[in-house]
Amino acid sequence: MKKYALFLLAAILVTSCKDEATTTVPDDRNLIPNPSFEQDGSPTLRSWDISGEVITIEDSPPGGGRYSARISEVWGPAGFISVTLPAVGGDKQYVFTCWGKTENLPAEIEMSFIRDSTLQTKSGAVTDTIWTIYSLADTYSARSGDSIKIILKGSISQLLPSKTFYDQCFLEVR
Ligand SMILES: [Ca+2]
């Protein structure tokens, strides 16, 4: 039942942000800056912290504009892109949704709430080779100074090459 509700929620989120996605006009409910990795028709990784081999590429999911972010596999810790935002005060539900796909190897998305050196983390595997919607949901009671970090990771490989793609990132607080 929970899974179904989450799927329904993801479907609603995607439907509701489809129109803005094509024009990349910021949705005021979305806390993620530069959610579609493009602005005014040009690719950009602006607002994201990057580690490893990350580029923008002309490949995007339905309603995702033209470009996505692509992370190549590395030998060692997975490459990633991340964004850190202040957590909203009070007891809230946070829902993160993005489109993702991977070529050969599983990758991972993470949503962490950070207070000093303490982390509360939700994560999920990115396994599909076609564009698929992935979601993470959690509740958190934020205090002043707490932050929320979204991490979109690539794969780890010592043999098989693989690339992971992300687009249309959406973080909503309820
Ligand atoms: Ca895009």
Image (spheres, rainbow, N blue to C red):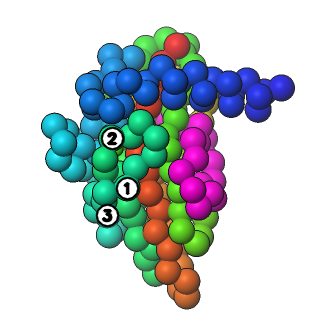
Of the residues shown, which amino acid type is indicated by label 2? Gly
- The residue at which mark 1 appears reads as 59
Q: Is 156 displayed left or right of 128 in the figure?
A: left
- Residue 54 is marked as 3
Q: Is 63 displayed left or right of 66 in the figure?
A: right
Residues at marks 3 and 2, CA–CA distance in whole angstroms: 19 Å
- Are discs 3 and 2 less than 8 Å apart at CB? no
Mark 3 or 2, nearer chain start: 3
The region drawn magenta spans 111-135
- Residue 101 is marked as none
Disc 2 crowd, CA 10 A, few/some/many (<14, 14-19, 20+): many
- Which residue is rendered at x = 43% and y = 14% of the image? 89
Of the residues shown, which amino acid type is indicated by label 3? Val
Pair 3/2: label in front: 2
Label 2: which secondary element: loop
Residue 61 lies in the magenta stretch:
no
Residue 60, compared with residue 122, is above or below; it is below
- Which residue is rendered at x = 33% and y = 41% of the image? 65
- The location of residue 140, given as percent across then percent down, is 56, 23
Q: Disc 2 beta carbon < 8 A from ligand 1?
A: yes
Mark 1 or 2, nearer chain start: 1
- The residue at which mark 2 appears reads as 65
Label 3: which secondary element: strand
